[in-house]
Structure formats: C-alpha cells, structure tokens
Image: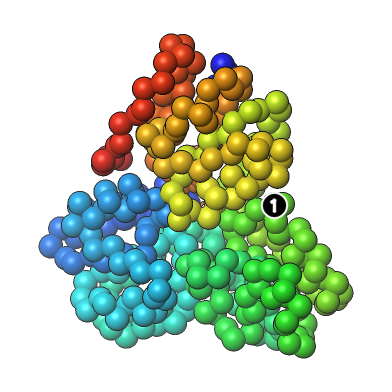
C-alpha cells in the first residue's frame, strides 16, 4: 500500500494570519473580555483552543453575524477570517466594541471589488447560502445578488451593468457551469473569478492525482474548502473520497486491500491532525493490522 501526501495541503496564509492575530490579541489584552463572531476558522479544534484561552466563541448557524453581535456588550470582538459586512463593523463600533479584524486579505479584495462595482451596477455573487463569507459580501449592498444554483440564476430579476464574482473557497469545477449560466442570461456581464490561490492550488493538486483508490480529506464538516476538496476528488474519478476530522474516523473497509491512498487537508485544518492521519495510514501499510485510532480530544498550536 502506498500513502501519497498531497501537496500543497493544510493551512493557508489567511488562516495562519487569523490564528496569529487572535493569539496576539489574547496575549496583549489579558484583562479584557474577548469574543469571536463565529468560528475563527472552520475547524472545531482551533475554536476549542481559543475557548480554552478564555475567548467567547459565538456560533449559531441560525443567526447572522449581525444578530450574533447582540450577544456582545463589551470588550473586543474578533472578526473571523471569513470577514463580515459593513453593517457588522458599523454596529460593533456603535456598541463601543474594540474591533480586531482577522478577515483574510483575499476576502477583503472580493469585498473591495464588490463595493466599487455596486456604486453603478449590480453584482451577481456565486456563493453558499448561510456561509459567513457570503453573508459578509452580500451585506455590502442590496445590489449584490447571491446565487448558489442554476435555478437561483434563472430567477434573478432584470439587472444592470453586471459583475459576476464569487466566494473565495468554491470549487473550480462547480463554479464553471454557474458562470456559464449567468453569461447565458446576461451576455454583457463582466466576470471576476475570485477563487483564492490557496483554494485553487489545493484543488488542482487533487486533479493531478493518478490511479488513486482512496482520498482522505482531513477537515471539519463546516469547512467549505475541505468539502470542496472531497467533491473535486469524486469528480476526478476517486469514488472513495472521504472527509474525516481525524484518523479515528478511518474504518477498516475504507482502506483494506487498497493500493494507493492519498491524503490532503482543507486550509483550516491543523497540520497535527493531517500528520496523524498520514502516520496512521503508514503504520497500517507496514503492519497490515487494523487498530482503530484514538480520538484526539484537544490540540495545542
Ligand atoms: S482559504 Fe483562501 S480566502 Fe480562505 S482564509 Fe485561506 S487564503 Fe483566505
């Protein structure tokens, strides 16, 4: 059995920057209440780490960032790597909160492009409904129209001077037909495709894999880019592509009698988790004995 460590994989610069900024904020403000507006990055181990440091991590899939802000009355609010709408920043300022902005620079670029364009046109934004990054961009203006499917595009009202753009962590495969449908309806629209470099090169690395029987994507179920890596693997012909949080989710029938197993991870996945999956598989390849891996309760970074 051969274990292939896909490269590049794991933490991107945006995630590293957000984690470092959050750590620095804790260190510099030992006596201040610190809240995070959502998961700092989409990985529960990272969130648990910060919770243990005393940070209040507010996350509720039924609430928008703007609504979550109602739960913070004082201190510092950390805006996560996914960014937030202008309304969130305004409301936090009005409440007298100290804002620490950990928005990824790539997300900020999409916000800036969108902000500029809505001054005299409409933006069709391809993104995931209820995803914080999409919420942040759609919140810029009511001239930003979120679409997630062909049906959404077909139901768009008449629009003017259109720019098509997208969430940074979408799949290079999925976005193509959506852009094509937009252009079918609005042939004069301009397109600024904004899948970030980190997402793109991690996805492209999977499309270069050959003769792979199994693909493990190490990542959190909340992580869009991890889910997309799994989808890309399947559309690349790897039928057995699994999203796992760690080695303990590997079952014997996933790996028994397989020749080539590839491992990658989403850009919000701690390296320790991915390495432990690789080590686990390498050990299985050597011994051919299946011993279920132990759950990892906590991680330190
Ligand atoms: S995946 Fe892309 S957009 Fe998201 S944090 Fe990383 S670099 Fe930024």
Q: Is residue 275 left or right of residue 46?
A: right
Q: Residue furthest top?
A: 287
What residue sits 34% from the left and 75% below the top? 68
Position in image of residue 270 (x %, y %): 40, 40
Q: Is residue 198 visible?
A: yes
Label 1, secondary structure: give it. loop
How is colour applied across the structure in the image?
rainbow
Given residues 148 and 240, the one toward you in this image is 240
Q: Is residue 204 visible?
A: no
Q: So how many labels did they put on this image?
A: 1
Residue 207 sits above or below residue 111 on the image: above
Position in image of residue 264 (x %, y %): 54, 36
Q: Is residue 210 left or right of residue 299?
A: right
Residue 247 sits above or below residue 106 on the image: above
Q: How crowded is the residue under tag 1: few (<14 C-alpha within 10 Å), some, or many (20+)?
A: some
Position in image of residue 31 (x %, y %): 12, 62
Given residues 30 and 83, the one toward you in this image is 83
What residue sits 51% from the left and 58% below the top? 105
Residue 154 sits above or below residue 283 on the image: below
Residue hosting label 1: 172
What residue sits 43% from the left and 11% below the top? 287
Image quarter for residue 170? Answer: bottom right
């Amino acid at each position: 059995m051969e274990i292939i460590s896909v490269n590049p994989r794991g933490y991107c610069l945006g995630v590293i920057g957000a984690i470092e900024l959050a750590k620095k904020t804790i260190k510099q403000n030992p006596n201040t209440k610190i809240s995070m507006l959502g998961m700092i990055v989409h990985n529960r181990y990272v969130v648990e780490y910060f919770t243990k440091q005393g940070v209040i991590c507010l996350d509720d899939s039924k609430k928008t960032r703007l609504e979550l802000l109602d739960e913070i009355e004082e201190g510092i609010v950390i805006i996560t790597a996914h960014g937030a709408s202008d309304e969130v920043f305004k409301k936090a300022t009005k409440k007298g909160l100290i804002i620490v902005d950990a928005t990824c620079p790539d997300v900020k670029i999409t916000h800036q492009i969108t902000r500029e364009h809505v001054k005299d046109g409409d933006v069709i934004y391809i993104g995931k409904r209820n995803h914080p990054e999409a919420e942040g961009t759609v919140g810029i203006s009511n001239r930003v129209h979120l679409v997630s499917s062909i049906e959404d595009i077909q139901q768009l009202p008449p629009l003017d001077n259109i720019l098509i753009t997208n969430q940074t962590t979408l799949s290079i495969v999925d976005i193509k037909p959506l852009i094509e449908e937009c252009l079918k309806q609005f042939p004069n629209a301009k397109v600024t495709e904004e899948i970030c470099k980190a997402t793109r090169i991690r996805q492209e690395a999977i499309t270069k894999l050959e003769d792979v029987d199994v693909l493990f994507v190490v990542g959190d179920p909340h992580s869009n880019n991890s889910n997309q890596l799994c989808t890309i693997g399947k559309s690349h012909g790897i039928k057995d592509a699994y999203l796992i949080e760690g080695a303990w989710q590997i079952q014997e029938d996933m790996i028994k009698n397989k020749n080539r197993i590839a491992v990658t991870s989403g850009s919000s996945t701690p390296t320790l988790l991915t390495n432990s999956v690789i080590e686990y598989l390498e050990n299985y390849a050597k011994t051919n004995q299946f011993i279920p891996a132990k759950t990892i309760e906590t991680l330190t970074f």
